[in-house]
Image (cartoon, helix red, strand yellow):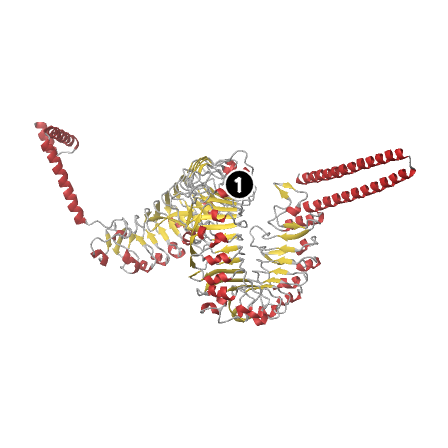
Amino acid sequence: MLGRQSGKRKRSEKSQMEEAIGGELGTEKERRSRRGLDSGIGAGRMRSEQGILVGSREKGFQAYFCWLIGFIRVMVVFVMITERKGCDGCLDNERAGLLHIKASFGNLDSWGTKAGRAIEDECCNWVGVSCNPATGRITDLDLDDITSPDGHDEFYLNASVFLPFKELRSLSLEYGYLTGCMENEGFEKLSTLAHLVRLDLNHNRFNNDILSPLSTLVSLKHLELYENELSTNVAGLEELLKLPNLEHLNLGRNKRLGNSILSLLSSISSLKSLTLSAVGLNGTISIYGLGALINLEAIDLTGNDIVLKDLDAFTNLRTLTIDASSLTELQGSDLHSQGWLVKLEKLENLTISDSIAQGNFLETIGTMMTNLKSLIIDGLSLNSTLPQGLCNLKDMEVLDLSSSNLRGELPWCLSNFTSLRVFDISGNRVSGDIAQSPLTTLFSLEKIDVSGNDFRIPLSLSPFFNHSHLQFFGGYDIQEIYGDHHIKQQQHGAPPLLPPLFQLEVLGLSSRYDDGEYVGSFPNFLYHQRNLEHVFISNTRMKGVGFPWWLLDNNTNLVELSLVNCSLSGPFELPINLHPHGRLQVLDISSNNYIHGPIPPHLCAFLPMLGLLYISDNQLSDIIPEELSNCSFLEVLDASNNRLSGEIPGRVFDMPELSLLDLSRNNITGSLPLGFISPWISEVYLSRNRLRGTLSSHGAEPGNYMLEVLDLSHNNFEGAIPKWIAGFRQLTYLLLNNNRFTGEVMMAFCLEQLRLIDVSHNHLSGHLASAFTSKTSCGDRMNYISPSRSLEFVSKTHLYTYNGVPLDLMCGMDFSSNSFAGEIPLQIGSDLIEIKVLNLSYNKLTGSIPSTLSNLQQIESLDLSNNNLSGVIPPQLTELSYLASFSVAYNNLSGNCPKQTAQFITFDESSYRGNPFLCCTFPIRPEEQLPGRRGSYDKDDDGDGGGFVDMETFYITSGVTYVMILLIIASVLYINPNWRRVWFYYVGVTITSCHHFTANNLPVSTEYKMWKFRA
């Protein structure tokens, strides 16, 4: 279809051009005929033969001239049509070559198809393919990450598949997990590609065997071999010497190269750029060993344990990238003691990262290296303010001082940087009002990133309206976003009178704290933006602002829109006549609280490329539209903490890319659809709804399922916990607590990766031994769930919410509040050595406490209370040095309590109460001898929380209160006789009623009954 449309478009354009040329030719004919007619009339009047001959010659010359012009124009049209054909589609043999590559790799499904239909041509528009617009031949192939979807199996390349591309100049195979090439099909096959100048093999598994075939590619100028498995301990690196035109070589993160690589590379005199980051260099390195590289202009030596010497040997060096630890001078007073930096007269770009330097380091740089145009200092712990000396670098174009522990305010001398294009000071402690900083005077700025500082930034960005080159503004995680009135605000929705001169591509604004105050309306300058690709605004309350659909309509290149906690209000509905947006992949409007109404049914039709949808913490209501399943690329759907109701459409679970589904904390009802867990989904959160039914028919056969998190807690599920849960070998977090599950546990809960399990507050029974197998372990954390996800789990008798790193470190099991019987399984003490929380309370467990529990060296909370355990408490438990919460209360334990040593000195009688045959002696702690001791759960001394009650004071105040009440009643009755009569009347009635009730209901002796009968 697209091919036919393209052909029609070409023919139409061709006919239009021909008509235009034909029209001009026709006009010329009329002009010639008029000229001929005039000549004829003149000849008739003059009756002269000479006049007739002259007119004929002029007529012939004009006809020839017009014919020549017409021929040239037709040729121009032919060339234009040929060029357009080359631009729209590549050559047939090269298209066939691309389809052959597609058949050889695993991640090129988009090639040759669009919306499920074949495409005849236009392969130059395929992802990763670039062509020469004049010839239509393919010149660049960017095939990063193209192997099988798992990406971790060995893959051997057939390089012959690239032979059809005769004009190929650049080939990228990054992240291909390539181990080598097929036999007789290696890179030597590409030696016939005379135009190939760039080859990118970064992030693969090639060893030295790859170098011999590469040495045949004599046209190569740029070779990338970053993070492979090259080594100087094996022959083959000398093959690099056979590349006479090599100018750029990247060997970074080949960790077994070592110092000997320097002498080998010294013979490649053509090198202009060399990357040796993290290649195992160590000790004091003299650069004189590379002195033969007279053309070297850029070198990267980061990530090595070295001290550099003699860098001034590179007189042509323009770009230097090193660790600060490579410069011994940084640990001293200044750089003046060595002077080699001064000798690098052509040095323009300096990058230093990851170390500690003296605060005057920047001052010295500004004094000694005034030719610098780019200074990048990332992660250098300077612990100082920005010095005035830095302002001597008046030719500076790029200044990146991110994460360098800087403080204070920006010095006004920075206004001297009139050529500055990039300013990045993110991740420091610099403060001040950005509207009153020197950045407002630097009109050449293209990128400003002040994120992670203590700045104050106006929401309108009005101080930067004259920065016509500005494309990137990062003000994320700063102290305050405030509203200003430098620009008069129009009435609802109207843009300002003076639009900004910039066209942003990236905008990030987020205050660190939400103080609850409104900062104004939605930034009006956004009405004039047309090039936005990424927008992040959060923790910035704006009054009376609905969802800005117009922002999508105005910015067709928008990829990510995040408006979190901005107090957006109004219904979340699509406007009429809004055009579909084909680029947006991330939409986050979570935590706005005032967005209400249903989820738009046609949201995916409007946003066909949507991949991440966050609409949590709002007031969305109604049912979940089944049309959401049309989001073919949706990976994350988070609609938690809303007011959604109804059942979950079954098709939602069938979305082919969905990996995370969070519908927790809603009013969703009904049962789960059949097969609700697909093989590709990894996280399912459905807690705190009103779901019901059984799970016995909702599972799947064991296989390569990716499920890591299953949270069905706080619902109304019933029946047995199904066996198919054991089929999820990647399952890491399983929460089924607070439901109505019954029956015995007939499967092993503790799978290979399981770290957190909670089945508390159900009606489960049987023996715990069936829930533990030889595979039971809290294994190493292999997979990481989304950092924004959180799980609730009881630890140390409190309900905590875990997310991020604490969740990754947590390992616990909660089987409490069920009816489990039998003994505590011995394998708990041998297989769960990494567990931190174990709760078996409120069951019917019997037997003794296993002494093997002392092997749980990481445990912090152990609760065995409210069971029928007997015997003694193992004294070995005192070896648990991390134990912070311990309870064996309300059992049938006997003997002596553990010695009050180590952690057990912190446990009082509440940990042991309810065991009548247990003998414990608790010494009074020193702090208990002080009056008014505060409990461990109380607030700080300056807070409002109370401590333990002083009982003597309590009794005195209570007695005084009761006496006062009685005196008040007696005084009232004494003063008012009417109230007194009513009072005594009701007292008499009450006494009589109590007498009759007692006589009729309480048992009396036989003698009393006999006496009453005789009476």
Question: Which percent across, then down, holds residue 73?
Answer: 76, 43
Name above or below for residue 686 compared with residue 386. Answer: above
Could you say which is closer to the camera, residue 286 or residue 529?
529
Q: Residues within 10 Å of mark 1 (few under 14, many from 20)?
A: many
* Three-letter code, disc 1: Leu
Task: State the residue position of label 1.
Answer: 552
Residue at the image position 32 percent from the left and 58 percent from the top:
877
- Where 931 falls versus 686 (above or below)? below
**621 left or right of 604?**
left
25 vs 271, left or right, is: right
Residue 259: x and y, percent? 55, 69
Specify the quadrant of the image occupied by residue 319. Answer: bottom right
Furthest-right residue in view? 49
Query: Is label 1 in a helix, a strand or a loop?
Result: helix
For the C terminus, the image quarter is top left
Q: Quadrant of the N terminus?
A: top right
| Front in this rendered view, residue 376 or 438 | 438
| Residue closest to the far front | 46
In the rendered view, does 137 fall on the left or right side of 562? right
825 is higher (above) or lower (below) than 695: below
Q: State the image quarter where residue 778 is shown.
A: bottom left
Query: Which quarter of the picture shows residue 178?
Result: bottom right
- Give the image location of residue 302, x and y in percent: 52, 64
Is 981 placed left or right of 682 in the picture?
left
Residue 788 visible (yes or no): no
Residue located at (33% from left, 59% from top): 881
